[in-house]
Amino acid sequence: MRAALRRYGWSYLFVLPTFSLFVVFTLLPVLQAFGLSLQSARIVGGEWIGLQNFVTLAEDPVFRQALGNTVLYSLVVVAAQLTLALVVASLIQPLGRKSQTFYRALFYLPLVNSAILVAMVWRWIFNPNPFGLANTVLGAVGFEPLLWIGSSDQALAAVILSAVLTIPGGGVVLYSAAMGSLPRELYEAAEVEGAGALTKWWYITIPLLKPTTLYLLVIYTILAFQVFERVYVMTSGGGPNNATITIVQLIYSTAFQFGRYGLASAMAVVLFIMAVAVAVVQFRSLRSDVEY
Amino acid sequence: MSSIRTKLPVHLVLLAAGVLSLFPLYWLFLTSLSPAQYVVKVPPEIIPREITFSNYQRLFETTPIIRWLVNTVVIAGVITGFHLLFDSMAGYAFAKRRFPGKDLMFWLVVSTLTVPAQVTLIPVFFILRTIGLLDTYPGVIVPGLADVFGVFLMKQFIQTLPSELEQAARLDGASEWQVYTRIILPLSKPALAVLAIFTFNRYWNAFIFPLVILRDPAKYPVQVGLATLQGEFNTDFGMLMTGAAVAAIPMIVVFFAFQRYFIEGIRVGGVKG
């Protein structure tokens, strides 16, 4: 016992602070979230009610709306982010080292700011007044002003547009790092065969980047599932008729405004399962991909 | 010649994308510096005709924004300091040392990297309520120390360090703690810099967690404070944009000073946007 302690004691001391914090504030809370999802926990009291919370959610039109909005937002935003990151990184790639560094920094700069702050600007841009910037742009190309975040039909589109109009700097950096390490031989062989730049890009670059694409797909999807600040700020927490309500926004209001902790935990479990499902799909696709 | 002809359109496209991407920030600063009558002008002025600091004066006089900034520096600073220490310790143990249970512990830690933070929000709120840390600085800080991105980052880096130096130090009679402080820490400076920048940025921008944990506006970090301004000055966009500008400036300065580390951090695995 003493010998073991002397041999391993330091190792355990080194991991002790992080690991104990991790157990108390991450590992146990994840398990507790599952436990709470099976209880009717409210501000005071609560009892075990089995899957009742999940039945309530399945029948709740607001939750369905939140789920649908979250999925729609994620599909559109992630597709746009992957495309933009790939295209921008491909454009940067043939440039000199200095230009590459400059553009990576240029596209990453907007992302050091908080989601709150960015959403405040977008709220200002998409405000329904004629002096709103989005309406001015519409007017300049001959369209009538829209109500944007003031309308239940257009609010979600404004929120999605605000996310799509930002170049995903992180993805650009990762894609360009991956492109820098692709094997030259394939390109040389293709050039011998007379392949043009676009052909090489489509048939060599994109397939070889699959691991990066999958990684970004998972990270961006899980981040998109968690969209909250944009909705909270741009549309004051859900917009007209819950037009922009999302899962996390609904978790927040259900738990911390209405004190229905059990029901909110059931929503958190749904979110958790969505995130895990995405991660599992990525793991599967990577495993089937033996060549790279 | 042909290189200029082919590269010029590429540069134009990239610059246009960059301008579009930076435009919200430009619009934010522009609005904060515009006199009130220009803020609601139709059509809006893209190039300022007149610049004023009256919004800033009003912001500093009527809101506790300075207090919020100080709170943010303290909260993000303390969290960052602890992460540098704890993550390098754990990263070192996972990278270099052998002990029973190491693989299981590391696997557990890594497996939660993709768990959305909102999943643990309610349970952590309950824990803090039970131990009486709701609406306190430690209540915002301590759970922030449990995030494991840094452990992963430090482990990946320390793994690449040669083991000979550690062995030599042990032969010279250095204690295990001295091996960590005198060999591992100095060699890990590049990774520690990345970790510091990333952690500080992440907690500078944290929102939902402090929003849930803190009640007293005097304790708010600046992001939560900004969100309350939104309620108070709902349509006073000049004022709102000025608050946002004041919250943005420190991170923009940090970015320009430590750009390299941001880019490096993303490569090691910290994509957030």
Image (cartoon, coloured by chain):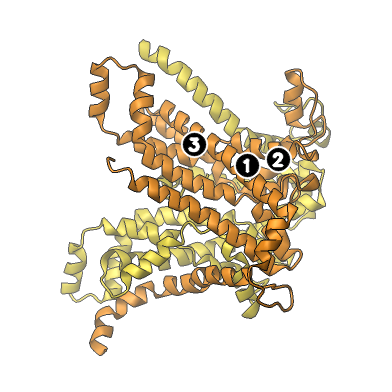
Chain colours: A orange, B yellow
Q: Chain of mark 3?
A: A
If you read the primary sequence from the N terminus, does the residue marked by circle 2 or circle 1 appear first? 1
Mark toward the viewer: 3 or 1: 1
Same subunit, labels 2 and 3: the answer reads yes
Is B50 or A209 nearer to us in this picture?
A209
Q: Are marks 3 and 1 in contact (CB under 8 Å)?
A: no
Q: Which residue is mark 2?
A: A156
Q: Secondary structure at mark 2?
A: helix
Q: Amino acid at mark 3?
A: Leu
* Residue depicted at 51% across the width and 20% down the height: B12
Figure disc tally: 3
* Residue depicted at 63% across the width and 32% down the height: B23
Q: CA distance from mark 3 to mark 1?
A: 16 Å
Same subunit, labels 2 and 1: the answer reads yes
Q: CA distance from mark 2 to mark 1?
A: 9 Å
Q: Which residue is mark 3?
A: A82
Q: Position of residue A239 (x, y in %)?
A: 77, 46
Q: Chain of mark 2?
A: A
Q: Quadrant of residue A167?
A: top right
Q: Amino acid at mark 2?
A: Leu
Q: Amino acid at mark 1?
A: Leu
Mark toward the viewer: 2 or 1: 1
Query: What label sits on residue A72 in the rendered view?
Result: 1
Is B57 on the left-hand or right-hand side of B188? right
* Residue depicted at 59% across the width and 53% down the height: B205
Q: Secondary structure at mark 1?
A: helix
Q: Position of residue B88 (x, y in %)?
A: 37, 64
Q: Are marks 2 and 1 in contact (CB under 8 Å)?
A: yes
Instruction: Work out which quarter of the rendered image holds the N terminus of chain A and state it.
Output: bottom left
